[in-house]
Structures are given as structure tokens and as C-alpha cells.
């Protein structure tokens, strides 16, 4: 993979998922990322139970491979001063504390901009940097509830909220954070100016629901819970029970609808103006099929699908140009993808002791080649000596910092002293 960001230095004071995901992308694209952690035990993800005894937790490795680790107490004036010194040699600074939380240590944008003009400073938070709610803590499930995401999922008529079953907002925030940093970096190349980026989880949630949000903001159209129906609302853009499993299909256009009806023996539907809008079904231009009586149309398809094996239908529909797939568990799909016969996904293994951590990669690859990525995942404070000596900290000063608990390196943990 092209190391597009090689030569960039990033100070990363983020933790948990959203911020570390942003800096993970940048590290894998070649940037030098220095992860700043608290000396006591590092960030909370380091403390998760590992699936491999004696080795780092999978979750932590998957978000922090390729980063250097500096464990330093920013609450101590000397610790904060060292971060400011590092900022002078850095291009990008990432943090995901509550707005204003690190200003008292002189690590806010204005303070660091004073020592590093042109710095790109990315603040990641739950609710943004301004407004009455900016001081609230942001967590994925809470943001899903607030923004309406938990009321989009689920079938029509349900009243109980249903969150998405993985931290989708956290991951999207990290992706958007990385994108915004790259955009600011290009701007800096063109103008020499830095930027203060305000990336929030609420903004990411709105982007994930972009069509619904846009429709409501523009025309006041209310969002409906549609269960497994596709966005087109075509009667055959849905998930149907088959004889031995579930099948999701996206027969949105008239040709796709007619093909699906034909192989299921439902050709008569295509001439029934009481159930379907035939002006759309027979129009020369493609449009989404519209049912006049959605329940009646879908019931006929439900009855027909239940008579057929799911794999047989999946193969037949796709061969005829109708997107379709059996419903899999995550494990079932990954077993298919790992086989490499149907798909060629650039999976990536990150180094971790003897076992390694296998991931789905970055979601893209260059030039159809297997990617070469940064592999190391540092022990807490494992890179402190090299990083601090690089900015002029002497051996004697480093020994003092370690002895007073301001800096931590592996196997040399000292008791913190009062400020």
C-alpha cells in the first residue's frame, strides 16, 4: 500500500473507539502516530479481557496497531509541558475529551497553535464543541437513542427502540475524523493554514441516516420504520422466509420484479392493476415498483418463497440480474469470505505475540495488491525513551520523570507524587 502519509507526525490523545479508529487509519497509511496514555494503566481498552492469555486484548490491538506509546501524566505541569514540546514537532493532534477538559493543561487548540502555527487539531466528541449539551459524555448506544437511529430500526408498528447491534456511530465517527484530517492536511498543503476540526458522534449519526435526514429537513417527510424492506420500498425489496432459511432480495425495478415473479410462478401479478401501479411497472424508463396494496402483494411472494430452497433461489435470481443473498450470521459470512472462492477481501493480520490479530483491513486496497501495513502494537509507554530523547530530554531528566511517576516505561513503574 502507498504510504501516502509517511513523514507526518500525529499526537493522539484519544481513547476507546472513535478517536483511535481515526488515528488507526492514518497510522496504517504511513503516519507516525504517538499514542498518549495515562501512566497508571493506559487507556481503558488495554484493560479488556484478552481472548489470548498473556497477550494484549484483540480490541485494543485492532484499533492501535502501528502506533507508538507514550505514557505520561498530563495533569503534572512537566508532563503537559512535554506534550507541548512534542506538538512543536507534530503536524496533527487528535483528542476526544469533553470540550475544554484539557485546556487547563495548556493542550487546547489555541495553546498548541501558539507553539505550532499550522497545526491540524481534531476534537472528537459526542455532541460537538458548542451548545448546552457539549459537556455531556457521548456513548454509541446513547447517541443512537438521541438521534432517532434506534427508532428507525425495527418493523412498522413497533414502539420499542432497537439499536444497531454494533458500535456503528463510533466507527463512522472515526472514519469521518480521518477523512476530515486528510481534507485539512490537503488544505494545509495548498494554503499553509492549519485547522481546528469539530467531529462529533451526533454528526456521524446524521450522516449515517443521510437520506432520511435530508428528506425531513427538506420537505418534512416523516421517517417510517420499515423493518427489512429496502429503501426503495418496492414490494420485492425485502427479506423473505424460504423453505430452509431467509433470503434478502432487491428486486426494485420493473424488470427485476417481473423476473422474480416469473421464477416464482406469479406472472399474473404483473397484470393486476388493483395490486400494482402498472403505469410504473410498464413504463419505458426504470423506476421503483409501486404496490397499491403492499401487504397483499407481499403475501403472495411470502407464500411462494416458502416453497423454495434459499440457496437455489439465491443462485437463480443473481444469474438473472436480481440482487439476492441468503441471510447469514457474521460468522457464516466470514467463513465464506475467508474461503476466497466467492470474494477476494484483503484481510490483514496484525502482529500480537505468537497469535496475531486478523482484521478485515482498511476497507480498500491500492493496485489490487496485498497491503503492507504497520504491525507493531506497543506496550504501555514502550516508546517513551525514544520519543522523549528525540525532543531533547536527557537520560538524567528521563530517569527523574520516571521516578516521579510522570512518565512510565515498561517494567519501571513508579508511584505518582502529589502535584
Image: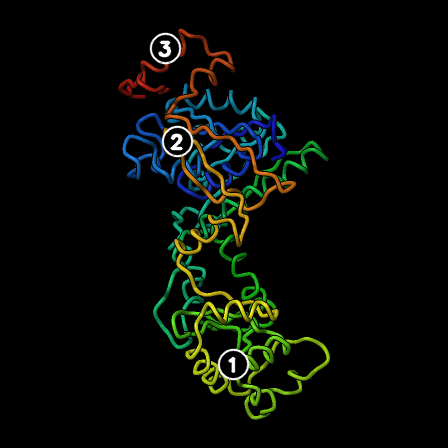
Question: Which mark identifies residue 399?
Answer: 3
Place of residue 164 in the rendered image (x, y in percent of width and height, measured from the top left): 41, 59
Q: Earlier in the sequence, mark 1 or mark 3?
A: 1
Q: Residue furthest top?
A: 396
Is residue 319 something that shows in the picture?
yes
Q: Secondary structure at mark 3?
A: helix
Q: How dense is the environment of label 2, judged by Cα within 10 Å: few (below 14), some, or many (20 and up)?
A: many
Q: How dense is the environment of label 1, judged by Cα within 10 Å: few (below 14), some, or many (20 and up)?
A: some
Q: Secondary structure at mark 2?
A: loop
> What quarter of the picture does the C terminus occupy?
top left
Tell which tag, 1 or 2, sits nearer the viewer.
1
Question: Which mark identifies residue 264?
Answer: 1
Residue at 56% over, 32% down: 92
Place of residue 265 in the rendered image (x, y in percent of width and height, measured from the top left): 53, 84
Q: Earlier in the sequence, mark 1 or mark 2?
A: 1
Place of residue 342 in the rendered image (x, y in percent of width and height, measured from the top left): 53, 54
Residue at 56% over, 93% down: 274
Residue at 44% over, 55% down: 333
Q: Which residue is label 2 attached to?
A: 352
- Residue placed most toward the observer, 76 or 296: 296
Residue at 45% over, 40% down: 96
Q: Is residue 340 above or below residue 57?
A: below
Tell which tag, 1 or 3, sits nearer the viewer.
1
Amino acid at each position: 500500500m502507498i504510504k501516502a502519509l509517511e513523514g507526518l507526525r500525529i499526537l493522539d490523545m484519544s481513547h476507546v473507539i472513535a478517536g483511535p479508529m481515526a488515528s488507526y487509519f492514518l497510522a496504517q497509511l504511513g503516519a507516525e502516530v504517538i499514542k498518549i496514555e495515562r501512566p497508571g494503566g493506559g487507556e481503558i481498552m488495554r484493560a479488556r479481557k484478552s481472548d489470548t492469555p498473556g497477550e494484549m486484548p484483540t480490541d485494543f490491538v485492532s484499533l492501535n496497531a502501528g502506533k507508538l506509546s507514550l505514557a505520561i501524566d498530563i495533569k503534572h505541569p512537566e508532563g503537559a509541558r512535554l506534550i507541548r514540546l512534542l506538538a512543536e514537532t507534530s503536524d496533527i493532534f487528535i483528542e476526544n475529551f469533553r470540550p475544554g477538559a484539557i485546556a487547563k493543561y495548556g493542550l487546547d487548540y489555541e495553546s498548541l497553535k501558539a507553539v505550532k502555527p499550522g497545526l491540524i487539531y481534531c476534537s472528537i466528541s459526542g455532541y460537538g464543541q458548542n451548545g448546552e449539551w457539549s459537556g455531556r459524555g457521548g456513548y454509541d448506544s446513547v447517541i443512537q437513542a438521541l438521534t432517532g437511529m434506534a427508532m428507525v430500526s425495527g418493523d412498522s408498528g413497533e414502539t420499542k427502540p432497537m439499536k444497531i447491534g454494533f458500535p456503528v456511530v463510533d466507527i463512522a465517527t472515526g472514519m469521518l475524523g480521518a477523512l476530515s484530517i486528510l481534507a485539512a492536511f490537503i488544505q494545509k498543503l495548498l494554503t499553509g493554514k492549519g485547522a481546528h476540526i469539530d467531529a462529533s458522534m451526533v454528526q456521524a449519526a446524521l450522516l449515517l441516516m443521510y437520506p432520511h435526514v435530508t428528506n425531513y429537513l427538506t420537505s418534512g417527510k416523516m421517517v417510517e420504520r420499515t423493518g427489512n424492506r429496502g429503501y426503495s420500498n418496492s414490494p420485492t425489496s425485502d427479506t423473505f422466509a424460504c423453505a430452509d432459511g431467509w433470503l434478502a432480495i432487491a428486486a426494485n425495478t420493473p424488470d427485476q420484479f417481473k423476473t422474480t415473479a416469473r421464477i416464482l410462478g406469479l406472472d399474473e401479478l404483473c397484470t393486476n392493476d388493483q395490486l400494482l401501479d402498472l403505469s410504473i411497472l410498464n413504463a419505458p424508463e426504470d423506476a421503483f415498483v409501486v404496490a397499491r396494496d403492499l401487504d397483499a402483494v407481499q403475501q403472495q411472494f411470502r407464500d411462494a418463497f416458502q416453497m423454495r430452497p434459499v440457496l437455489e433461489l439465491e443462485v437463480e435470481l443473481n444469474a438473472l440480474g436480481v440482487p439476492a443473498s441468503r441471510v447469514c450470521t457474521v460468522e457464516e459470512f466470514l467463513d465464506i469470505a475467508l474461503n476466497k472462492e466467492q470474494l477476494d477481501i484483503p484481510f490483514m493480520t496484525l502482529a500480537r505475540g505468537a497469535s496475531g490479530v486478523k482484521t478485515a483491513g482498511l476497507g480498500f486496497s491500492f493496485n489490487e495488491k496485498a497491503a503492507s501495513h504497520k504491525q507493531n502494537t506497543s506496550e504501555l509507554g514502550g516508546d517513551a525513551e525514544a520519543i522523549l530523547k528525540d525532543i531533547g530530554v536527557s537520560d538524567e531528566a528521563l530517569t527523574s520523570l520516571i521516578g516521579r511517576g510522570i512518565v512510565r516505561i515498561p517494567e519501571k513503574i513508579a508511584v505518582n507524587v502529589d502535584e
